[in-house]
Amino acid sequence: MKGIQRRSFLKTVAGGTACLYGVLRSQGQPSPPACPQGPLGKTGITLSRMGQGTGMRGGNRQSNHTRMGFEQLVKLFRYGYDHGVTFFDLADLYGSHVYFREALRAIPREKVAILTKLWFRYDGNPADLPADFKRRSTDQAVQRFRHEISTDYLDIVLLHCLMTPRWEEEMGPYMEALAQAKEKKQIRAVGVSCHDLGALKTAAKCPWVDVILARINPKGAKMDGPVAEVVPVLQEAKANGKAIIGMKIYGEGTLVNMKEECMRYAQNLGLLDTMTIGAESQEQVRENLDLMARFPATTTS
C-alpha cells in the first residue's frame, strides 16, 4: 500500500506541475530565465546562483515551507529545479530533510547541491557537554541527515546560528567530527551560519571554515550589524578563501517593497558565490529569477 500511495503522490505532483505549465502557456507567459550556475568558492561544488530556502519562520523542525505539506513543497522544489535552481538550503531545525527526499525521487541527486545545518543546541548548553559527547552527537546527526534525505553525501553542512565570537572554543569537538565526515567523503564542505557580528569576524579568520552563510542586504535588515561593518568582514572572509552564501537578501521579508534594489545590491556586491531565498510560491521563484536576469552578477574574487 505504501508503494501505491507513493506512486500516486508522485503522479499528483507531476500532473500539477504539467497543469501549471499549461496554464502559463495558455496565458502567453514566457518561461522565466534559467538560473545561472557557478562555483562555490574553492569547494569544488557547482551550484545555482540562487538557492531555494526552506526556513521561513522556521523552528522546532517545521517552517512555512514544511507547513505547505509534501505535495506543495515538492512541487515548489521541482519548479525551481526545472528552471535551473540546483541549490537547496535545508536544515534539521526546519524539518525539511524528508521533504527534499521526496523531491529526489524525480530530481537527479548528482545534479543538485544540498546544504543542511546542525542545530547543536538540541544537545543542551555546549559549555556543559563533554567533548566525546559532542563528537558522537555530530556523527550520529550526519548519519541521520544522510538517511533522512536518502543520500550518500551532503554537499555542505554548517554549524547553525553561531552567536558568540568565541564559538571555536565550544564548537571544537563538533568541528572535529564534521572534518572527519568530510575526510570520509560524507560531506564535501563545512562552515557556519552566523547571527552575531563577532561570530562572523571569527568565521572570516577560522581555517576550518569553507563556507559562510551570511546575512546581507542594502539596509542592514535582520543582519549581524550595520552594512558598513558587515561588508569589510565578508571581504576579509573572501580574501581568506571562504565561499560566501548570502541570506536575508530581502531582510526576511521586511524589504519586499524594494526587491529590485535588494537584488541589484546582492548581485553587484562582488562577494557572494550564491544566495538563498526562501520563496514560498512558484510566482516568487519566477520573480526572483526575472530580477536575477535583469541584474547580472558581478564576478566574485
Image: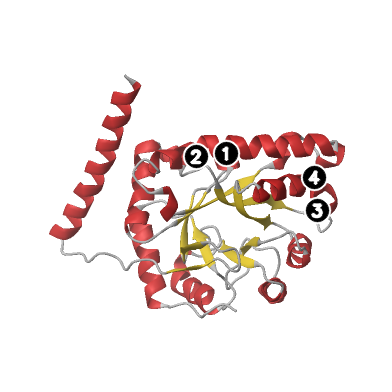
Element under label 1? helix
Q: Amino acid at mark 1?
A: Phe
In three-dimensional space, the C-alpha distance between marks 1 and 4, rounded to whole angstroms, equals 18 Å
In front: mark 3 or mark 2?
Answer: 2
- Indicate which disc residue 149 carries: 2
In three-dimensional space, the C-alpha distance between marks 2 and 4, rounded to whole angstroms, equals 24 Å
In three-dimensional space, the C-alpha distance between marks 4 and 3, rounded to whole angstroms, equals 11 Å
Residue at the spot x=36%, y=40% of the render? 105
Q: Which is more toward the observer, 85 or 162?
A: 85
- Indicate which disc residue 167 carries: 3
Q: Amino acid at mark 2?
A: Ile
The colour style of the image is secondary structure
In front: mark 4 or mark 3?
Answer: 4
Q: Residues within 10 Å of mark 1 (few under 14, many from 20)?
A: many
Disc nearer the start of the sequence (3/2): 2
Q: Residues within 10 Å of mark 3 (few under 14, many from 20)?
A: some
Q: Which residue is mark 4?
A: 173
**Residue at the outermost left position:** 26
Q: Which residue is mark 1?
A: 145
Residue at the spot x=25%, y=43% of the render? 14
User: Circles 1 and 4: CB distance less than 8 Å?
Assistant: no
Q: Amino acid at mark 4?
A: Pro
Q: Which is more toward the observer, 281 or 111?
A: 111
Q: Quadrant of residue 24?
A: bottom left
